[in-house]
Amino acid sequence: MKRILSILLIGAATLGLTAQENDSKEIIKKGWNFGPLPVVGWDSDLGFQYGACVDIFNYGDGTNYPSYNYKVNLEASTYTGGSSLLRCYGDFKTLIPDGKLFFDCTYFNAKKFDFYGFNGYASPYFGTDFGVADGEKSAFYWMRRNQFRFVTSLQRRITGNLHWAAGIGYYNIVTSDVTMDKYKDQVSLYDLYRTAGLIRDNEAHGGNVLQLKAGLVYDTRDHDSDPTRGVNIEATLVGAPDIIDRAGYSNLGFTFVGSHYVPVWKDRLTFAYRLGIQTKLAGEIPYYFINNLNTLFFRKVYTEGLGGNASVRGINRNGVVGNGIAWLNTEFRWRIVNFRFINQNWHIALNPFFDMGQVIQPYRLEEQKAAYKAAGGELNPLNPFYSGNEEKLHATAGCGVKIVMNRNFVISFEMARALDGRDGQKLWNNIGFNYLF
């Protein structure tokens, strides 16, 4: 990872003087544009990724460039950590007058899915090598999860930059203990939570979730994928009636996500920040869906948190979950070089960042405390239910490099470090697609 970043920065410095002279000669894209690519990535939580994808853009007559009329993405990839995905999503900006249509259809197969308990610092963290001999891999914080997801959202203008939006989502989730032979004799936190009743029998193996969404969107960004100025605010009411499984997990929630892009120096340097708040208003959420981020339009494949590459970069994936969560992402985006290559417009950007988040509405916290007391009231390997610590901000710092084609296709390299060892003790790094927000 460090070698890749070094090569990119040296290349940017070499190209800098000549490339900046060509800023005024940007190629206006028209018609169809295909971007077939091998998928080669890395994620500290998932391992090395390989596969193939294609981005298909339609720019029409070029009037709206760098914005596109339609975009469709197809991807098939797998990770050495045991996960794989099949995905198709589309973003249609001109199909509906004064509106847009979005859909996402994805299948995830995760043989090792992270589970760290509930409520952030209220759950003790023993480290990734907990409970095994030196040189062995621990499955204590892993479980198995397969998920099928289909989401579609519609947006229409009310007036000016204000829009109404509505959507529907269906999720089928299957969970179990890790089934890989080399881990089958290990005790996991998922096992212990099931035994203690923190994960109930009628949710232990997953279930079905139907979501209905309605909200307002205010958007003044100059661009969708690579904005340099403006704001984007989504306020969404989300209902999940339990009409399929009828297991008692109907719920109602509210999600607010607001992003602001402040130009510091022309379009070369931008300060960007995003504030997110998600709360439960009524009902009960099953444990297997407590980590879902209920946004209308996806920017990342994974829409879960907190932790990982979709929310607070640098803390353990799914390390901070609760009925209500809040998070803040801040970063500078410095476009250090522009250039033309294979008849496309490219630029390289640097983005140092600082992220934070925490649980603001606990999930089964009293049950955690009760399980801890029932197991003897002393923290040990068989009683990992409650740490006795108050929840507080989880913070990280890091930096990334972006390679951007036509302001729409973004290859991302990022690394970060948790500022508290209870959120992870290793350097987190990720190679993937798109800005975080």
Image: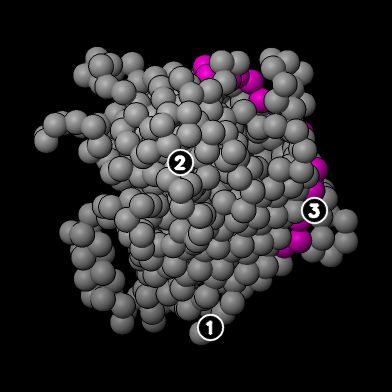
Depicted 65 relative to depicted 382: above or below: below
Q: Which residue is mark 2?
A: 386
Residue 145 point in image, percent of width and height: 45, 24
Of pointers 2 and 3, the one earlier in the residue sequence: 3
Regarding mark 1 in the picture, which secondary structure is present there? strand
- What whole-number distance in Å separates the C-alpha atoms at marks 3 and 1? 28 Å
Precedes in sequence: disc 3 or disc 1 = 3
Q: Which residue is mark 1?
A: 264
Visual colour scheme: one colour
Q: CA distance from mark 2 to mark 1?
A: 45 Å
| Cα–Cα span, label 2 and label 3 | 39 Å
Instruction: Please state the extent of the stretch shown in magenta in the rendering.
Output: 203-219
The answer to whether residue 178 shows anywhere in this view is yes
Check the image and report above or below for 32 versus 107. below
Left or right: 166, with 301 as reference point: right
Q: Where's residue 408, x and y in %?
A: 52, 55
Q: Of the residues tagged 2 and 1, which is closer to the observer?
A: 2
The extreme right residue here reads 159
Element assignment for label 2: loop
Q: Nearer the viewer, residue 325 or 21?
A: 325
Between 157 and 346, the residue placed more toward the observer is: 157
Residues under numbered marks 2 and 1 in contact, where contact means CB atoms less than 8 Å apart: no
Which mark, by number, is residue 216? 3
Query: What residue lies at 38% left-to-right and 79% top-to-bottom?
Result: 20
Is the residue marked by circle 1 packed among few (<14), some (14-19), or many (20+) residues within 10 Å?
A: some
Pointers 2 and 3 in contact (CB under 8 A)?
Answer: no
Q: Is-magenta flag for residue 204?
A: yes
Q: Which residue is at a point 30% across and 43% down the rendered structure image?
A: 126
Q: Which residue occupies 88% across, 61% down? A: 159
